[in-house]
Image (tube, rainbow, N blue to C red):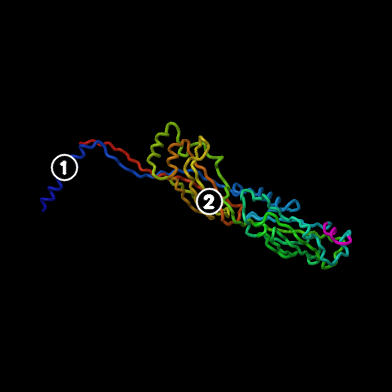
């Protein structure tokens, strides 16, 4: 048996020597990973949301008699002070046309009747700037009377209506204007009356106002594009390809089997977002043929998401210079609040997986 092993070993060594003499080269296959940093970006909330447009939209909705005041940046909140009737408007509706409120008492006195309703809020064509069409979670509102020493001296009863829905409100009692605001394009003051529970002094100056708090806690009714770098795409190739090295890099691209974009991020905006990545033809200033890749960006810090951009490899081979476009989207049906002190901080890098075959020449001894 021992003799058999020596014969077998001699046969194997003879075959190896014969084969080695016939070879001129061997091939070494490698699967290296090439990592390339792309960018570090900080997108602030002022980049994503234009508060000036929001204030303008609110002012248009509530009309020229309303004052819109920012109250908080985190969460973004506005206050609306809408004057409905000043003291002279009220005096004009009291029988006997008194010149002041001295001695005025009793009631109720009609200020608005159903045959001459007053439009309170108009939402026709109004959107909240870059947020587009949104549904506000709530709009806490209160009907108040200012310009008197004791609010209990006067009681206001009113009815708000839309096309078909009446909502009764009373002075000093809070109510939610949100359902009417979200569902209807116009809100009317259908009826309003005033009752003087005590006799007012001559220098009293009652003014009826609607005070509304608008915390921007909302639901998105359709996808909204908040940000894109389309107008600021770098003009150079993302791989730095130029005339003298384009061939070498093209060889690497030919051997590329995968392309992953890693994104480390902190999202302190208060909004769940989506990020869309699209190939970009710099020379023709437009997107490449491949479909964009989209991932969800949740709220929080020290998070990572990966985009599989392997489908863009063919575009990269035939497009020089090639780059990427990033678009931030506010997704439909997401609910969130706006933190205007927040930002979306990104660190992006590419992971290129290749399959390279390296020929190695050898000579038989």
**Numbered disc total:** 2
Q: Quadrant of residue 198?
A: bottom right
Q: Residue furthest top?
A: 243
Look at the numbered disc 1 and give the secondary structure of its residue: helix
Is residue 91 found inside the magenta-colored segment of the image?
yes
Residue 339 x, y percent position in the rendering? 60, 54
Q: Residues within 10 Å of mark 1 (few under 14, many from 20)?
A: few
Label 2 and label 1: CA atoms lie apart by: 64 Å
Q: Residues within 10 Å of mark 2 (few under 14, many from 20)?
A: some
Magenta-drawn segment:
89-96
Q: Quadrant of the C terminus?
A: top left
Is residue 155 found inside the magenta-colored segment of the image?
no
Dot 2 or dot 1, earlier in sequence: 1
- Residue 216 sits above or below residue 310 on the image: below
Apparent side of residue 155 relative to residue 257 in the rendered image (left or right): right
Look at the numbered disc 2 and give the secondary structure of its residue: strand
Apparent side of residue 318 relative to residue 332 in the rendered image (left or right): left
For the point 19% across and 42% down, the residue is: 16
Disc marking residue 14: 1
Residue 359 x, y percent position in the rendering? 30, 38
Apparent side of residue 265 relative to residue 126 in the rendered image (left or right): left
Are the two marked residues, 2 and 1, in contact with CB atoms closer than 8 angstroms?
no
Q: Nearer the viewer, residue 190 or 298?
A: 190
For the point 45% across and 43% down, the residue is: 312
Read off the residue under disc 2: 274
For the point 47% across and 39% down, the residue is: 238
């Amino acid at each position: 048996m021992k003799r058999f092993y020596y014969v077998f070993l001699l046969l194997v060594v003879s075959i190896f020597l014969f084969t080695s003499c016939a070879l001129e080269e061997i091939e070494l296959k490698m699967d290296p990973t090439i990592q390339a940093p792309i960018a570090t970006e900080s997108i602030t909330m002022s980049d994503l949301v234009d508060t000036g447009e929001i204030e303008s939209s609110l002012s248009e909705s509530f009309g020229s008699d309303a004052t819109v005041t920012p109250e908080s940046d985190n969460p973004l909140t506005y206050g609306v002070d809408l004057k409905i009737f000043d003291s002279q408007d009220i005096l004009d509706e009291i029988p006997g046309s008194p010149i002041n409120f001295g001695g005025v008492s009793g009631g109720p006195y009609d200020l608005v009747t159903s045959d001459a309703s007053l439009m309170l809020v108009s939402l026709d064509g109004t959107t909240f700037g870059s947020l587009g069409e949104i549904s506000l979670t709530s709009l806490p509102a209160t009907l108040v009377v200012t310009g008197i020493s004791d609010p209990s001296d006067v009681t206001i009863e009113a009815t708000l209506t839309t096309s078909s829905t009446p909502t009764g409100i009373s002075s000093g009692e809070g109510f939610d204007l949100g359902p009417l605001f979200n569902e209807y394009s116009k809100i009317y003051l259908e009826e309003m009356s005033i009752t003087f529970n005590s006799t007012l002094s001559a220098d009293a100056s009652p003014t009826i106002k609607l005070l509304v708090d608008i915390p921007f806690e909302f639901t998105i009714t359709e996808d909204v594009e908040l940000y894109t770098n389309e107008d600021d795409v770098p003009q150079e190739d993302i791989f730095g390809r130029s005339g003298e090295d384009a061939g070498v890099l093209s060889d690497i691209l030919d051997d590329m089997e995968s392309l992953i974009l890693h994104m480390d991020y902190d999202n302190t905006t208060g909004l769940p977002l989506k990020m869309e990545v699209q190939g970009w033809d710099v020379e023709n200033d437009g997107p490449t043929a491949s479909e964009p890749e989209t991932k969800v960006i949740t709220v929080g810090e020290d998070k990572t998401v990966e985009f599989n951009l392997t489908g863009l490899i063919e575009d990269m081979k035939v497009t020089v210079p090639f780059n990427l476009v990033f678009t931030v989207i506010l997704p439909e049906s997401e609910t969130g609040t706006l933190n205007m002190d927040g930002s979306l901080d990104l660190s992006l890098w590419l992971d290129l997986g290749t399959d390279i075959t390296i020929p190695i020449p050898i000579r038989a001894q």
